[in-house]
Amino acid sequence: MKHADLILKNGVIQTMVGDTTAEAVAVIGGEIVYVGGNAGVESYLGADTKLIDLDGKYVTPGFIDGHTHEVMSLIDADTTLSFENIPPSMEAYTEAFQAFVDAHPDNPMYYGDGLDINAFPDGAVTNEWLNKICPDKPVSITDMSRHASLLNAKAMEMIGLDSTTPVPSGANIYKYENGEPTGFIVDGISLMENLPQREHTKKKFHDAFLKFQEECSSFGITGIDVAAATIQDTEAWEVYNQMEKDGELKLRVNSTAMNFEERNVDASVAKEYISRLDEYQSFNSDFQKISQAKVVFDGVPEGKSALLLEPYAPEAGEAADFKGDAYSDPESLKEFTALLNGAGYQVQIHAMGDGAVRCALDAFAYSRKVNGDKDFRNMIAHVTLITESDMQRMADLKVIGTMQPLWWYYDPNFSPLEEMMFGTERFEREYHIRDMMDAGIKITGSMDYPVQPDYRPLSGIEVGVTQCSPYPGEKDDPKYTRNPKQGVTAREMLECYTINGAYEMKMEDMIGSIQVGKKADMVVLEQNILTCDPKTIAQTKVCCTIMNGDIVYQC
């Protein structure tokens, strides 16, 4: 018998095959060759075997993040002011931005990200504070969702933004009562084409990705589904491919075709995506799958750019009949989806409002009518608001919900704004996860990083169970609890981050469970998260992460 490269023994190993647990695992050449009791693994032990005595620790399949934007916040970290750790107040924001400008006097333009709309009274974002600090150079600061940008007067001048500027489909331009823009634009990427663009080279992406995957490993993440690459999609695929060849890739990646500048999709865009995806199919491997296309169909609730079935609440400050808008014509979305599915590719649609979710389901239903009832594994990202009838329809159409558990509790960033825009009754209908699972919807866990800077799967698992904050000092505070009756089990949340994630990535034959013949992607935790106090899950220590049989992180 060939000796193992790696053995784990004396643990509680959650195989994710039914309720089966084991004590030991043996790995040869990155593949699991034994799962069972301690006694049976001894025959695999050799002089060169790496032996880990788990001493009762808990092992699960490696975690899979089902929706991430990988290095978006890392690639420009040296030239961007991050507002994420700055208290959300105008005083703190003004002080931090002034210090940033003073420290970088030669910058031709100033960038920021992570702006919290709650820092502005009643969510009314304006640029006067930027204009006072920097009147002569352009400034662009994205909000936490990365769907909106606050521009100073100089940047507005450069793009020609004024009271006469038409509002693009799906966008929202915030204005004063006199009709003049405040500088805050939601989902208006097409308006900002004339601003200076930072160069995102493959080298910069590669270096940032190395940092990203190192942090992923420390969180127990061994696989990711990329919602949209930070650089041109084909360039990202080439970087992943080269990293795999060089032995640098320590994450399994499901890659996505998407043009950030192309939000209005139709048949011609579908054909362009298919051509691009077809060209790169030779890159498919155990580490990278190039299998999907992404569509941003609506925007975000806090930016009043999500598409709703009924008008926004009066507190949103819009016209009485305002329901938001979509980037694409629903009929064009149907054709786009049918063509991609017909070519063998998944389609992921960003849809947050219940109107957008319905249009996405219409597109998926149309595709099944055209292409037949095949294994498409289409996805809706976020699914913030969905009607009960569409919930069952989503399950029947076998559409995956790629969702973000840290939005399921009453978080201080997005929840107050969403409640203001939707009204309390409709806000309370957001994220009915228990109902979605009971309807038969397969859900994957993620954090939409860097929109949610804490992308630890253990935080998401805890929130799914408690429907409350996972952070010390907030766990027992009822103001952070949102939908207590929508809590699910820790086992169900672990499925979201393992076997469901593998299914979404079309890699369930290789990963997602601990079985003989599968790849050795595993995470060792200090305690059993299925039996411990749920309020301690998020603080559980990741002791070791194993990817393809290699130890990529050890505390």
Image (cartoon, rainbow, N blue to C red):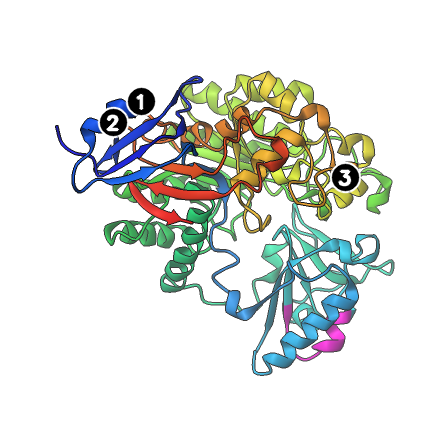
Front: mark 3 or 1 = 1
Q: Could you tell which of marks 3 and 1 lies nearer the N-terminus?
A: 1
Disc 2 marks which residue? 41
Disc 1 marks which residue? 37
The magenta stretch spans residue 56: no
Residues drawn in magenta: 129-139
Q: Amino acid at mark 1?
A: Gly
Residue 166 place in picture, x, y as percent: 70, 55
SS type, badge 1: loop
68 vs 57, nearest the viewer: 57
The residues bearing labels 1 and 2 have C-alpha atoms spaced at a distance of 7 Å
Disc 3 marks which residue? 477
Q: Which mark is residue 13?
A: none
Check whether the beta carbons of the residues at disc 1 and disc 2 lie within 8 A of each other: yes
Residue 143 place in picture, x, y as percent: 66, 56
Which residue extends farthest left? 1
Q: Quadrant of the N terminus?
A: top left
Which residue extends farthest bottom? 106
Q: Could you tell which of marks 3 and 2 lies nearer the N-terminus?
A: 2
Q: Amino acid at mark 2?
A: Val
Q: Residues within 10 Å of mark 3 (few under 14, many from 20)?
A: few
Q: Quadrant of residue 385?
A: top right
Q: Residues within 10 Å of mark 2 (few under 14, many from 20)?
A: many
350 vs 449, nearest the viewer: 449
SS type, badge 3: loop
Residue 410 place in picture, x, y as percent: 73, 39
